[in-house]
Amino acid sequence: MPKSTVRSVIALDPARGADEAEAATVPARLAEYRRHGARAAAAFVAGASSPQAPPGRLRTAHIRTVLGTPDHVIAQANAGMYTDPGAVGVRPHSEAYLRRRPQPALTVWTSEKAAEWERGTLRVPRSRVEYWPRTGHYLPEERMERTVGLIRTWADGVMAG
């Protein structure tokens, strides 16, 4: 098997690790995306920012982007994350993926429960999991300087190590 050129992975509030309760909502959410496509996804996006997020154009831009996405693409993307073969959104599949990933990873979660779960699943040396409270799904926009600083520090460490 050829050696990977990927030195590390960075995931910011990834769509993986859905526990049983969240996984139970996946079929209904997928059905909603199949019925209402972009309109249903826009409702999710509208609520994905924290109260601390800067108001205005970025949130509006995300909503407009989703509303401009064809409905079938919204449903396909969700299925690709959670229900299609090889999808890693649901916890057992996520755990299998994390166990076979050879590269160290930096993961930032906005859910303390998800961060604790991933910390307990890690098997790769030098991997790191952070939890950022009071932050919504769009971390780079809500906490731009902190995100950039963290990625720079991580990249410097990967390149040095």
Image (tube, rainbow, N blue to C red):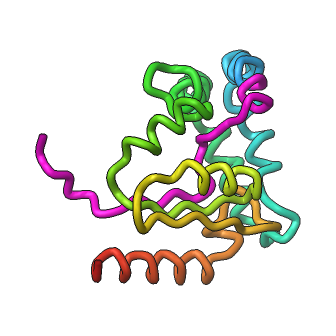
On screen, residue 145 versus residue 105, left or right, reads: right
Does 18 appear in magenta? yes
User: In the displayed image of the protein, which residue is found farthest to the right?
Assistant: 51
**Residue 112, quarter of the rendered image:** bottom right
Position of residue 51 measured from the top left corner of the image (x, y, whole percent)? 88, 65
Residue at position x 44%, y 81% in the image: 152
What secondary structure prevails in the magenta region? loop
The N terminus lies in quadrant: top left
Above or below: residue 95 compared with residue 92 = below
Nearest the viewer among 139 and 87 is 87
At a point 71% along the width and 27% down the height, the residue shown is 23
The one nearer the camera, 28 or 35, is 28
- Locate residue 126: give its quadrant: bottom left
88 and 54: which is toward the camera? 88
Compared with 125, 42 (above or below) is: above
Is 12 included in the stretch rendered in magenta?
Answer: yes
**Position of residue 53 in the picture relative to residue 34 (left or right):** right
Q: Can the viewer see residue 62? A: yes
**Identity of the residue drawn at 67% across and 56% down:** 115
Residue 39 visible in this rendered orientation of the protein = no
Residue 70 x, y percent position in the rendering: 57, 29
Image coordinates for residue 48, horizontal then vertical, percent: 77, 51
Residue 43 coordinates in the image, percent (x, y): 80, 39
Q: Is residue 154 above or below residue 9?
A: below
Q: Which residues are magenta?
A: 1-25
